[in-house]
Image: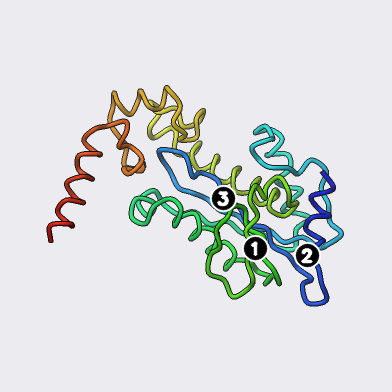
Amino acid sequence: MRQTKDFDNSFLTRKIKLIAGVDEAGRGPLAGPVVAASVIFSPDTFIEGVNDSKQLSEKEREELLPQIMEKSIAYSVAAISHSKIDEINILQASLLAMFTCISRLSTVPDLILADGNKKFESIKPVIPIVKGDGKSFAIAAASIIAKVARDRIMKRLDPKFPEYLWRKNKGYPTREHINAVKLYGPTPLHRKTFLKNILPKFALSEFKREYEIAGD
């Protein structure tokens, strides 16, 4: 996948010397935060095996993470809570996570490559790259950091709510997770806006809230 490094370096110019990749993990789960990570490498740094985190096993991601951290110029992570996701929606929460982790970088990049098709506010130029985690080395590395960080969060939370099997499903809507929500109800860490198709009362309460707003 050395072509991913060539992709990043194609953006280098006399004014653009440092590029940050940014990606998020956790847009689809029913519970827990959405997590974004950003990372900056020198133009000559390449790590064999770095790829879209979804194409890697958990073991491969865990093995690559320390190499990414060690060989990067800077990296950062940001998590946006389930309650904030319910408040502003998952797209805005994902963009907020990306903005936040970029702002936490100890080194300021000259350009930001972001996975997806949306920009977020930044003092530096942001270029959205559709399916960027498979095209850009920096975005792929960021996707690994974000995925590992979020998986670790869900594993730490698993003992508090073992019925939902978060250690296994990381909060994603597997059949076992959905059945647990139906049987036991949501935990305080579930995204209530994600449960409308699982628990009818959430769809009803949302309808009532929208009706009341419309009637004001």
Where in the figure is residue 192, as x and y percent of width and height? 31, 42
* Depicted 186 relative to depicted 125: above or below: above
* 210 vs 68, nearest the viewer: 210
**Residue on which the image places disc 1:** 127
Quarter of the image with the N terminus in it: top right
x 46%, y 53%: residue: 91
**Residue 129 in which image quadrant:** bottom right
Q: Are marks 3 and 2 in contact (CB under 8 Å)?
A: no
Check the image and name the residue furthest to the front.
Answer: 214
* 213 vs 173, nearest the viewer: 213
The answer to whether residue 87 is left or right of residue 60 is: left
Mark-to-mark CA distance, 2 and 1:
10 Å
| Amino acid at circle 1 | Ile
The answer to whether residue 101 is left or right of residue 214 is: right
Q: Residues within 10 Å of mark 3 (few under 14, many from 20)?
A: many
Q: Secondary structure at mark 2?
A: loop
Where in the figure is residue 127, as x and y percent of width and height? 65, 63
- Number of marks in the image? 3
Q: Residues within 10 Å of mark 2 (few under 14, many from 20)?
A: few
User: For residue 24, which numbered disc appears in the image?
Assistant: 3
| Amino acid at circle 3 | Glu
Q: Earlier in the sequence, mark 3 or mark 2?
A: 2
User: For residue 148, which numbered disc appears in the image?
Assistant: none
Q: Secondary structure at mark 3?
A: strand
The answer to whether residue 48 is left or right of residue 100 is: right
Q: Are marks 2 and 1 in contact (CB under 8 Å)?
A: yes
x 55%, y 46%: residue: 25
**Residue on which the image places disc 2:** 11
Q: Secondary structure at mark 1?
A: strand
- Number of the front mark, 3 or 2: 2
